[in-house]
Image: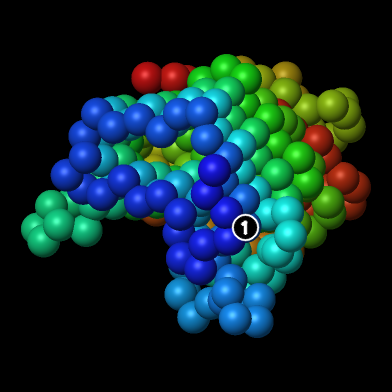
Amino acid sequence: MIEKMQTRPIDINALADGSSIRNTDIWDWARRLSDGAETSLSESIGGIRIRSRRVATQNVRMGMRDWALNTTSGKEQVGIVYSYNGAAGVAAGAEDCIHTDCHFENLYRRVRYEANTLRNAEGKGNKGYNISQSDLDSGQNIFPIVLADDIATSVLMPSNRVAVHFECQTTTNGSPRGEVLVNTTGSPAVTDISLASTTNILFSTGSLANGGGTDGNLILSAHTDGKLYISNRTGGTLSIRVSLPRE
C-alpha cells in the first residue's frame, strides 16, 4: 500500500518499457504533508504516471480517502496519467499500455491521456466511484457522457481519421445516434456516415468552450489537437455514449 504521498506515488519513466503495476492500493496524494494544502506542482497529478511503452496496470485501487480533492484547475488528482517521455528530441511516450480491473475513487478523472501517447486501452473490470469528470479519451468509454445545456467537452481521438459511434438516451432533435467520420489532421472535418437524424446537429471545426456553437443545436467539431469537441446547445441535458475503435 502507498498512502499520503506529497508528490505522485508511482512514476514509470521513459526507460521502463514492459513494466507492470499490480495488486496494490494507492490512497491520498498531491497535498502538502504539513498542513494538507495543495502542492505547488502545476499539473493533473496521477496516482500512477506512465511514460513508457507496453506497461500493464492491473488490480490497483486508488483515490482520495482522508485528503480532499484539489480544486484548482490543472492541479487535480487523477488515477492514471499516460504521458510523453520528456526525452530531448523524442516525441513519444506511453504506447500500447493497458489498465484492467482498477478501482478509482473520489478523483477528478480516472484516466488522462497527454500528448504523444498512442494505442493505450482500457481493459475489462475498471470501476469509478464519485469521479468529477467522465473519462472522455481514447479506448472503451464504459460510462455515458452527461452534458447539460450550454456545456461542452472533448474526446481525444485514437488516430487522425476515425469513425465514432454515438448512442443517445433521448430521441429529440439534436440527439446523435449513429456514426460520423472525424478527421483531425490537414483540414479537420466531421462527416456524417449514418446518423439516424441530423436535425439540430451541426458539424464544425475548432475547439469549443462551454456555450460554444449555434444555440439550439448539438455541435460536433474536429480540431487539429486530435480531439472531437461536443457542445450541447439543445436546451436540455443529453446522455451520450461515445464508442471508439480499439487498435
In the displayed structure, does residue 115 sit left or right of residue 140?
A: left
Q: Quadrant of the C terminus?
A: top left
Camera-side residue: 40 or 194? 40
In the displayed structure, does residue 237 sit left or right of residue 33?
A: right
Q: Could you tell me which residue is drawn at 9 percent across and 58 percent down?
A: 89
Q: Could you tell me which residue is drawn at 21 percent across and 48 percent down?
A: 14
* Amino acid carrying mark 1 in the image: Asp
Work out whether residue 169 can be spotted. Answer: yes
Location of residue 133 in the rendering, given as x and y in whole percent from the top left corner = 69, 50
Q: Quadrant of the N terminus?
A: top right
At mark 1, the secondary structure is strand
Location of residue 85 in the rendering, given as x and y in whole percent from the top left corner = 24, 52
Work out whether residue 215 can be spotted. Answer: no
Among the 4 quarters of the image, the one containing residue 71: bottom right
Query: Counting other residues with Cα less than 10 Å from the Cα at mark 1, is it few (<14), some (14-19), or many (20 or more)?
Result: many
- The image shows residue 120, relative to residue 30, as above or below, that is above
Can you identify the residue that label 1 sits on? 28
User: Colour mode?
Assistant: rainbow
Q: Give the mark count.
A: 1
Camera-side residue: 165 or 180? 165
